[in-house]
């Protein structure tokens, strides 16, 4: 099966959107925009009552494709990744129907941006979450990690680049449940079925209402974070860290 973003509508009005970018689901610029488009299409489709966001492979999402960024001259890939992540995170949050994130394995960086904006999260019992941006000389997704854990824990995880297990997040109420990986898709379908059985007109109104009473504007908050990432890139700091990660010595964005 071809890698990329796949969107499939089931007979029970549940739409599955699958990320499949081997080996670790680090999405290229085009992948973030593809994901945003798939979610926007789901919003417009009245036959879609709920979306399950899932992934194939070792883990749910490893963030942006840093090697793509380092192998692209100038700032085009950086700007593309910033805009693509913003579009994808926004599309999850503003999807007209609830989004259930089914998280397997690792969920890092941009993956936290997706999950933090989802409406319900189920995970495999080996799943873990983290925002290791400081290791890459970048910032971002603190907005979304703050939706998964309390403020002081978010700051500790952010400053240290530590990860937190899905089982721990169950205790914080942000992950509904953890199950063996082989049972993850069924666990996501179970909650999706509970949502899909209701009148989609009511559920769509409820989604809009709940977003409307959110105390934080997640779109503006994340966009603010991205400004500091751009500053670090202009200063050359980000390139130094990405070169180390990608095993290059190109420094193309300096």
Image (tube, helix red, strand yellow):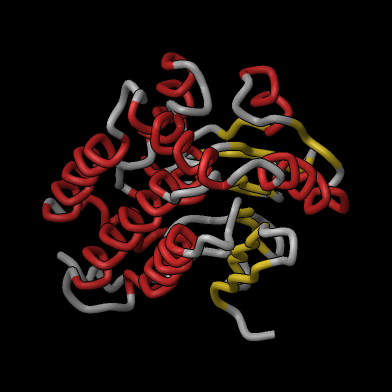
Tell me where residue 93 sits by quadrant: top left
Q: Position of residue 196 (x, y in %)?
A: 67, 47
Tell me where residue 68 sits by quadrant: bottom left
161 in relation to 6, above or below: above
236 in relation to 99, above or below: below
- Can the viewer see residue 62? yes
Identify the residue at image location x=35%, y=56%: 85
Identify the residue at image location x=52%, y=28%: 148
Of residues 132 and 209, the one drawn nearer to the viewer in this rendering: 209
- Can the viewer see residue 65? no
**Left or right, residue 125 beside residue 2:** right
Q: Position of residue 23 (x, y in %)?
A: 63, 70
Of residues 70 and 164, the one drawn nearer to the viewer in this rendering: 164
Q: Quadrant of the C terminus?
A: bottom left
Identify the residue at image location x=60%, y=52%: 49
62 in relation to 6, above or below: above
Identify the residue at image location x=33%, y=30%: 212
Looking at the rendered structure, the number of numbered marks drawn on it comes to 0
Q: Position of residue 211 (x, y in %)?
A: 38, 33
Q: Quadrant of the N terminus?
A: bottom right
Of residues 68 and 177, the one drawn nearer to the viewer in this rendering: 177
**Left or right, residue 93 beside residue 84:** right
Q: Position of residue 97 (x, y in %)?
A: 51, 48
């Amino acid at each position: 099966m071809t890698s990329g973003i796949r969107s499939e509508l089931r007979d029970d009005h549940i739409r599955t959107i699958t990320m499949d970018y081997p080996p670790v689901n680090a999405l290229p610029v085009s992948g973030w925009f593809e994901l945003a488009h798939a979610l926007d299409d789901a919003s417009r489709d009245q036959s879609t009552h709920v979306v399950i966001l899932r992934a194939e492979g070792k883990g749910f999402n490893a963030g942006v494709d840093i090697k793509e960024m380092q192998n692209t001259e100038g700032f085009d890939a950086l700007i593309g990744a910033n805009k693509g992540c913003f579009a994808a995170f926004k599309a999850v949050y503003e999807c007209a129907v609830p989004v259930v994130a089914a998280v397997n394995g690792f969920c890092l960086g941009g993956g936290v941006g997706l999950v933090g904006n989802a409406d319900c999260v189920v995970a495999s019992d080996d799943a873990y979450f983290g925002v290791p941006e400081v290791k890459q000389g970048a910032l971002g997704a603190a907005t979304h990690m703050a939706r998964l854990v309390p403020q002081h824990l978010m700051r500790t995880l952010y400053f240290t680049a530590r990860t937190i297990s899905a089982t721990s997040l169950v205790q914080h109420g942000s992950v509904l449940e953890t199950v063996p990986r082989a049972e993850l898709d069924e666990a996501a379908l179970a909650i999706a079925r509970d949502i899909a059985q209701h009148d989609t007109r009511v559920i769509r109104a409820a989604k809009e209402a709940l977003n409307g009473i959110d105390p934080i504007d997640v779109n503006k908050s994340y966009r603010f974070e991205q400004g500091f990432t751009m500053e670090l890139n202009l200063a050359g700091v980000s390139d130094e860290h990405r070169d180390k990660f990608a095993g290059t010595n190109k420094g193309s964005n300096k």
